Image (cartoon, coloured by chain):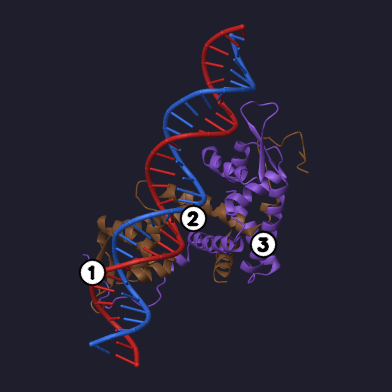
Chain colours: A purple, B brown, C blue, D red
Amino acid sequence: MNEPVALEAADGLEARSELLEGLIGYALRRTTIVVMADFIDAMEGLGMRPVLFSMLAVIRENPGINQTTLGRALGIQRANLVPLVNELISRRLVDRRRHPKDGRAFALFMNGEGGLLLDEAIARVSRHEERVLAGLGDAERRQLLTLLNKVRSG
Amino acid sequence: MNEPVALEAADGLEARSELLEGLIGYALRRTTIVVMADFIDAMEGLGMRPVLFSMLAVIRENPGINQTTLGRALGIQRANLVPLVNELISRRLVDRRRHPKDGRAFALFMNGEGGLLLDEAIARVSRHEERVLAGLGDAERRQLLTLLNKVRSG
DNA sequence: GGATAATGTTGTGTCACATAACAATCAAGT
DNA sequence: ACTTGATTGTTATGTGACACAACATTATCC
């Protein structure tokens, strides 16, 4: 028991794991980290993070959306959304008005400044995706998207 | 300026974004979250997280590996690895000996208890991947793995 | 032997999650 | 109309995975 399998230690410069290399979950995790890091780089100087970007996108395409619905669309819980929405508002990218028919809810709207920032971010995201997907052809990109959504939707 | 695009607010139960739905980075992020959540569920009661699992796998397949090499293999920085390795050691899953030829380094070895835990985790991971990939055929799974690795390797 | 590099470590900070509890408001049923 | 129960936004708190800077000890290289 407890045998020192190989005394000559595997202390080379690189190590691999056949087990991990066969797991899609592992590949997903590692790939996402790389892609998100490139996203962050692409947003240099904009103060834009993946979450904020997705929030701005959903708000612009769904004017008047409330926070609960926004959170559900992005898989973010209401409680965690609060400081994020506050950040967008204090940066004057988004307007929050009271919902006309529901006294509990707020209605979120993108304003001019937010639209300009989102447009700039979209331009950078395009270049970012082009960079990250450079090794894939058009059909492969579509298929990757399809497969990812298939996994996500169960 | 600052026009309330639609006065009838988009406050339905669900909201979508065509922009986000076309982005592979977004699909990657959302899918990874779902898959990792299922991984966590699958490890119920084992005290096993994705990072710990991957560390155990690499250590068993690379006996005597040092922390820097382990970190490089998994994309974890030395500094962040320290508490993780300590956790494995204090749980008696892994042994840390001084490296015979390098006084600075440690050599990490999986022990019997760690091997048993890893085996149980692997069994659960198999069921977890089967569950998560239920919607994909064999060829699709292979292709997803290939595409992910292509993206990651630039 | 002296300069330079590598290993493990400590400390600190950020960010994306999670959960529980709460006030205000709405909706539904009787 | 009034109570019951659900919903919205919020506060508070905790965790876990990252980042970066600085440091002591030990190797390496000339």
Q: Position of residue B7 (x, y in %)?
A: 76, 34
Marks 3/1 in contact by CB < 8 Å: the verdict is no
Which chain is home to disc 1? B
Residue for point 58% across, 54% down: A50
Q: CA distance from mark 3 to mark 1?
A: 48 Å
User: Is any part of residue A142 visible from this angle?
Assistant: no
Q: Nearer the viewer, residue A47 or A105?
A: A47
| Foreground label between 2 and 3 | 3
The residue where tag 2 is placed is B129
Identified by mark 3, the residue type is Arg
Check if mark 3 and mark 1 are on a common chain: no
Residue A91, position as x, y percentages in the image: 62, 47
Please name the amino acid that badge 2 sits on.
Answer: Glu
Q: Which residue is denoted by mark 3 in the rendering?
A: A124
Judged from this view, the residue extending furthest toward the left is: A1
Please name the amino acid that badge 1 sits on: Arg
Discs 2 and 3 carry the same chain letter: no
The residue tagged 1 is B97
Find out whether the residues at labels 2 and 3 contact each other: C-beta distance under 8 Å. Answer: no
- Looking at the image, residue C7 sits to the left or right of residue A131; the answer is left
Mark 3 or mark 1, whichever is nearer to me: 3
Mark 1 falls on what kind of element?
A: strand
The residue that appears at 59% across and 59% down in the rendered structure is B137
Name the one closer to the observer, A93 or B27.
A93
